[in-house]
Image (tube, helix red, strand yellow):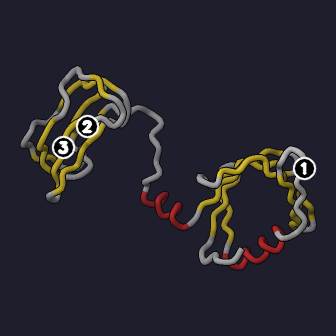
Amino acid sequence: MKGFNENIIVEINGERFEIGNDDHQTLSAMADGDVTIPENGSEIFEVKKDKILHKIILVDFDLNTRTCTVEMDGQTKHVRILNGLDMMIEKMGLNSVRSHKQNLIEAPMPGLVTAIKVSNGDHVETGSPLLILEAMKMENVIAAPHSAVIKEIKVKVGQAVERGLPLVELS
C-alpha cells in the first residue's frame, strides 16, 4: 500500500483501531497473498495474527463511504475506514447527525436579520429558506432542517441577534 503518509483508523463494530505507517507494509504483504474468489463473488482473505489464522470474507464494500461488511471467523463485522480528514471533521463536530427533530432554530452566529421568508402557520420542507441573517457583510440563509410547521417567528427584520438567540420555533 504505497502512498500512505498518515495513520488510518479502522472502525470495526464501533471499536476503533489505529494502523500506523509501519503497519502499512505488513498489511500490504498480507493482502498480496493468495486471494480466493468463490462463485458468489465474495473475496476471501486469510490473515495470521498471533499465530492464529483468521478467515475473512468480504461480503460488501462501498468505496464512496469507505465502509464494508465482512465475515470473520463466522461472525459478521461492519467496518469503516477513516482517514485524517474524517478525523478532523469529527473533532470539529461537523459530522454530528441529530436523531431528533429540531424544534427551535437558533442563530448560528451574531448578525442582523435582513429578511423573513415565512409566516406563522406556514408548512416548510427540508431546506426551505426561513430567514436571511447578515453577518460579516455576507447574507446567510437560515433553512428548515426538516419538514415542519412554523409555530412562532421569534425575531423581526432589522433586529440584531447574538449567537444562540432563538429565531424560529417549529412544530
Cα–Cα gap, marks 2 and 3: 8 Å
Query: For this view, does 112 lie left or right of residue 94?
Result: left
Q: Give coordinates of residue 112: x percent, y percent.
A: 12, 48
Tell me which label, 3 or 1, sits earlier in the chain: 1
Amino acid type at mark 1? Pro
Query: For this view, does 163 lie left or right of residue 1?
Result: left
Residues at discs 2 and 3 in contact (Cβ within 8 Å): yes
Q: Quadrant of residue 171?
A: top left
Q: Which residue is mark 3?
A: 132
SS type, badge 1:
loop
Q: Does 149 sit above or below residue 132? A: above
SS type, badge 2:
strand
Q: Quadrant of residue 66?
A: bottom right
* Residue that appears at 64% across and 59% down: 81
Q: Which residue is mark 1?
A: 38
* Residue that appears at 6% across and 43% down: 158
Query: For this view, does 23 lie left or right of residue 149?
Result: right
The crowding category of the residue bearing disc 1, from other C-alpha atoms within 10 Å (few below 14, some 14 to 19, many at least 20), is few
Q: Which residue is mark 2?
A: 129
